[in-house]
Image (cartoon, helix red, strand yellow):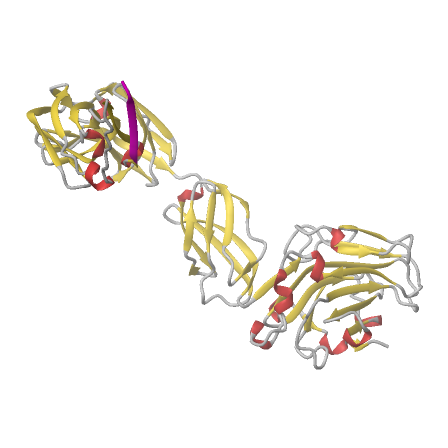
Amino acid sequence: MIMNIKATTFITAVSAFALLVFTVGCDADTEVDQTVEEILSAQPAITSFSPASADIQSRVLIRGTYLNFASKAYVGDTECRITQRINGETLEIEVAPEAESGVVRIATSAGKEASSPEQLSVTYPQPAVSSELPEGGMVNENIVIEGTNLRTVTKITFGGTEAIIQFKEAQALVVSVPNNEGEGQEVRMYYNTASGETSVALSAGFSITIPTPVINNWPQLMNRDSEVFITGEDLNLVTSVTIDGQEAPINASSATALNFNVPEGVQTGYRDIAVHYGTDKQLVREGVPYINGQYEKYIEFDTDPESVFALDLSKDPLAVQQLNGNAEQPPFPGASYYNLQMNTGTGSTIARMRLHSETANETWQQILDPGNFGDNPVLHFWINTEGTAPILKLYIGGTSNANRRELSGGNTNTGEGWKLYAVRLKDFIPGLTSVGSAFEIRLNTGSGASVFPVVVNLDWIVVTDQVLTEFGAEDVTDLFKPAG
């Protein structure tokens, strides 16, 4: 006997059932060609189901043929969830809470239907609660309710607000107290009967308390084009966020995170953020800086290490750089700044920050592009020289003297405090229209320095489309001089 087996069609059916269609013949070659549409259009049939009588929200096994292609299932006219496609001959469904006695039906995506020869008798066991509810609880607190037939419960409300049922079985369910602050609230349990949905009161005087959300990190700085992120605890209880009284669109909210955008009408400056919860409660963060304009951050020492500056110790063996020194932090945005101490008077450049090789933000190459930053790009940085007078050099478009401007002497002496310096980059170097491959900040002591060590503290190197006078920025553009 010669046996030839040919499988010409391999079909992956819906619901992850793989069907390899083949025919085995003796002393003959037999080949089967079927399309996916032909197989899916097979007529299903229901031969039986069990049990014959089922409680709502209980499981029923359906038996027949081609049941694995069922896309919908019904008891009477009520759609029921398909819980498991066991194989082509067995299907499991869950009787919907609102179902009524009737025939069992299925429908396929190809439009084929099948009905059971007998009706399923649907029963409605009445749930009963044996445990007592507490007098009150906090929002999001879980409450365990014990009793019988609790699987048939459809919902539980506190003062009319539906709660989330976290877990449910016949003898117990767990429900979370909803966000509905108040005293003396009625708690009701709902379930279905042959006449429809009904309910019973579980408590007439439940008190709901809203916990105060915990905010672990307020934003240090906000800008027009970036989403604001807040993390903490119980943040899903927040009902709204306002910036200086204007409501901010909330993009996402969970128990641990809250994301929103600043409203369009808020102007540049120090702004108050109010996080509202409950009926009339709020948490407020005053004076968060906000920039309503184009903004690009290049160096900020909460995230960028001091190594973004290349320190040439051959010029000054005693030079030291580090994160943070003896000065207080600048007003914003973070908790770390760059500290450099230079100890010689040779006039040599000993520290260089190369924007083109040390920052992951590649937009620095487009700073001078026509139309970018409204044709008014402005470099900003915090500086504190602690009463010393270093020389600060900016190289744009190249590293020759023609591409260099210097700020020196008394212009860099900030006294003992921080200053926010602003440099208008358009026409900063006449004729220059492209940053090209170079954008550098260099620091050195200068040959005329009389106080040692010369100290420089820097932070928050950014570009905006305006001089940030709202934050006390000083426009020092005209104080920079050509090299030489």
Instruction: Give the residue at x 23% y 33%.
Output: 32
Is residue 443 shown in magenta? no
Quarter of the image holding residue 429?
A: bottom right
Give the side of residue 214 with respect to residue 453, left or right: left
Instruction: Give the residue at x 11% y 20%.
Output: 53
Q: Main secondary structure of the magenta part?
A: strand
Quarter of the image holding residue 67?
A: top left
Give the side of residue 280 with respect to residue 227, left or right: left
In percent of width and height, residue 227 lies at 49, 56
Instruction: Give the residue at x 19% y 39%.
Output: 38
Give the side of residue 141 with respect to residue 433, left or right: left
In percent of width and height, residue 182 lies at 32, 40
Residue interval drawn in magenta: 1-9
Instruction: Give the residue at x 28% y 22%.
Output: 169
Quarter of the image holding residue 100?
A: top left
Q: Is residue 435 among the parts visible in the rendering? A: yes
> Is 303 rendered above or below residue 180?
below
